[in-house]
Image (spheres, grey):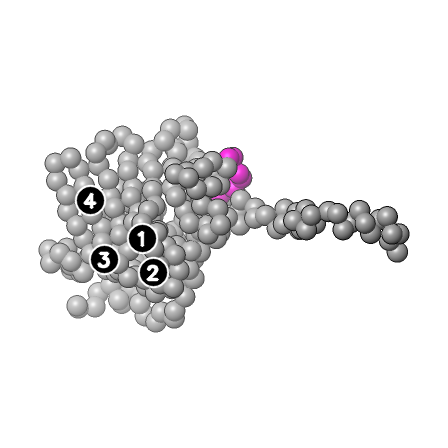
Amino acid sequence: MLTNPARRRLCGVPFSLLLAGPALAASPTAEEVIERFDKLLWGSTLQGQFEMTISTPSWSRSLTLKLWTHRPAKSFVRIVAPAKDAGILSLRLGSEMWNYLPNIERSIKVPPSMMLQPWLGSDFSNDDMVKESSIVHDYQHRFVGEPRVEGVDAWEIESLPRPEAAVVWGRLLSLVRKGDYVPLSTRFFNERGQLVRTLSYSDVRPLGGRQLPTRWEMQPENQPGKKTTLVIQEARYDQPIAEDVFSLQNLSRRR
């Protein structure tokens, strides 16, 4: 039982200090931050429509695509515009991927060695579009800084490949906004430590029942002036998706 002097000393302690211990204990780990931002962007399932614009200093082209994904193992992408590209499909089941090309009416299996090749000439890879590798499960994470980015407090997190993970990036550096776990950027480094590309997120607004960065811009380091922008136009999260969406039969259906 506290004596009267002890009670007086306890009453003199600010309430905020009494809560400091539990608050500090509840601070997220780097892995939890990465999981939260990954879940924010992708959910357990996502059905969405995106506009992709590929730009260089001399030309640009735009595609409209629909995406269905069921984390962690299934993805389906269909281009719906422009007409000359409509009907191009991509399917991932586990570690396997296929592209369907309507001009030759054939499905082509993508070998693992091609997963980091550009998807339809964009700065996003085959792997990016169907999410074979996972930043959550294939990397180990640690905090390396807490910068302010454009007046906002953020975490800087370094992600290094797990020994058993089949990934090619030697290192990732992500900036994630504190408070709402909105990602600001991810930089991708090769095994020699050289920066290869940067993915920046912007235009945060309500969509799909959450606050999302709706503009994603990928810029390669070795091609000045080239970039690919994805703008989310529609998004439905955590809703059931019919199993036959993720099937080889769906690749060959007439549309």
Q: Nearer the viewer, mark 1 or mark 3?
A: 1
Please state which of residues 164 and 188 is positioned toward the viewer in this rendering: 188
**Marks 4 and 2, the one that precedes in the sequence:** 4
User: Could you tell me the amino acid type at mark 2?
Assistant: Leu
Q: Secondary structure at mark 3?
A: strand
Q: Badge 4 is on which residue?
A: 54
User: Could you tell me the amino acid type at mark 1?
Assistant: Thr
Q: Secondary structure at mark 4?
A: strand
Q: Is residue 161 above or below residue 39?
A: above
The structure residue drawn at horizontal position 31% and vertical position 49%, both measured from the top left corner, is 203
Q: Quadrant of residue 48?
A: bottom left
Query: Marks 4/3: CA distance?
Result: 13 Å
Badge number at residue 214:
1
Q: Nearer the viewer, mark 2 or mark 3?
A: 2
Badge number at residue 25:
none
User: How many residues crowd around disc 1 within 10 Å: few (fewer than 14), some, or many (20 or more)?
Assistant: many
Q: Is residue 37 visible?
A: yes
Q: Badge 3 is on which residue?
A: 65
Return the x and y of residue 109 as percentages of the image width and height: 28, 53
Query: Marks 2/3: CA distance?
Result: 17 Å
**Marks 2 and 3, the one that precedes in the sequence:** 3
Q: Magenta stretch mostly in which secondary structure? A: strand
Q: Quadrant of residue 221?
A: top left
Return the x and y of residue 97 as percentages of the image width and height: 32, 54
Q: Secondary structure at mark 2?
A: strand
**Marks 4 and 1, the one that precedes in the sequence:** 4
Q: Which residues are magenta?
A: 139-145
Badge number at residue 207:
2
**Marks 4 and 3, the one that precedes in the sequence:** 4
